Image (cartoon, grey):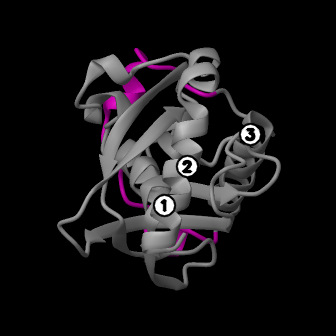
Amino acid sequence: MELTIAKIGDPVLRQPAREVPEKEIVSEKVQKFIDDLIETKRAAKGAGLAAPQVSVLWKIFVAEVDGSTRYSYKPPIPLTVLINPKITFLTEERFENFEGCLSVPDLRGVVERCPEIRVEGLDREGKPIDQVMKGITAGTFQHENDHLNGTIFVDRVKDSKTFCTWEEFKKHHENEFHRQVKIIVAKYGS
């Protein structure tokens, strides 16, 4: 079932999510929610979606990038369900990432992200996940994890002059950003 995506201004987006007890992960309720979260992300053509974005304060997000998303320039991410995630930065380096958000329709802005992170948590069966993510993919995971802490990408934009609509991004910034993505992927991997 497709869920309603909360938009900026909805107080639910500013509340921290709670951990999902491990014994509840395989429950019908949580599994159905995960299916609905995936369906909603795919219908919206997003790279990821976190539970608070659909008004559920659980520490769950999904990420997936393929040809069906609105981010064709991003490296592919296989469908990943992450529950109770913990992200650790593995470097002091940062890169600039032009981000958008399903909860902030038609707005993009430049955010600094760490290019190498360790992602720990549980998958939808409750099995441990412990992976290193790099480059643009690391940025996607940080963006979704921020939602679990009540943070939206607009909070991380250091220069408000980088804000633009999708239409203006495509006209004025997309080609340069695609070039930058290639450089980031070449330097850090996906």
Residue 41 on image: x %, y %: 70, 43
Q: Amino acid at mark 2?
A: Arg
Residue 121 on image: x %, y %: 43, 74
Q: Is residue 12 above or below residue 30?
A: above
The answer for how far apart the CA atoms under marks 1 and 2 are is 7 Å
Q: Answer whether residue 7 is magenta in the image.
A: yes
Q: Determine if residue 19 is in view.
A: yes
Q: Amino acid at mark 1?
A: Ile
Q: Which residue is mark 3?
A: 45
Frontmost of labels 3 and 1 is 1
Quadrant of residue 149 within the rendered picture:
top left
Q: Amino acid at mark 3?
A: Lys
**Mark toward the start of the polypeptide (3 vs 2):** 3
Q: Is residue 36 above or below residue 158?
A: below
In screen coordinates, is 83 left or right of 80?
A: left
- Residues in magenta, as a range: 5-26
Secondary element under disc 2, as helix, strand or loop, is helix
Quadrant of residue 125 within the rendered picture:
bottom right
Query: Residue at 47% of width from left, 37% of height from top?
Result: 99
Q: In the displayed image of the protein, which residue is found farthest to the left?
A: 92
The answer for how far apart the CA atoms under marks 3 and 2 are is 22 Å
Q: Is residue 102 above or below residue 137?
A: above
Q: Which residue is mark 1?
A: 183
Query: Residue at 77% of width from left, 45% of height from top?
Result: 42
The answer for how far apart the CA atoms under marks 3 and 1 are is 25 Å
Q: Residues within 10 Å of mark 1 (few under 14, many from 20)?
A: few
**Mark toward the start of the polypeptide (3 vs 1):** 3
Secondary element under disc 3, as helix, strand or loop, is loop
The C terminus: image quadrant: bottom right
Q: Are marks 1 and 2 in contact (CB under 8 Å)?
A: yes
Residue 133 on image: x %, y %: 45, 73
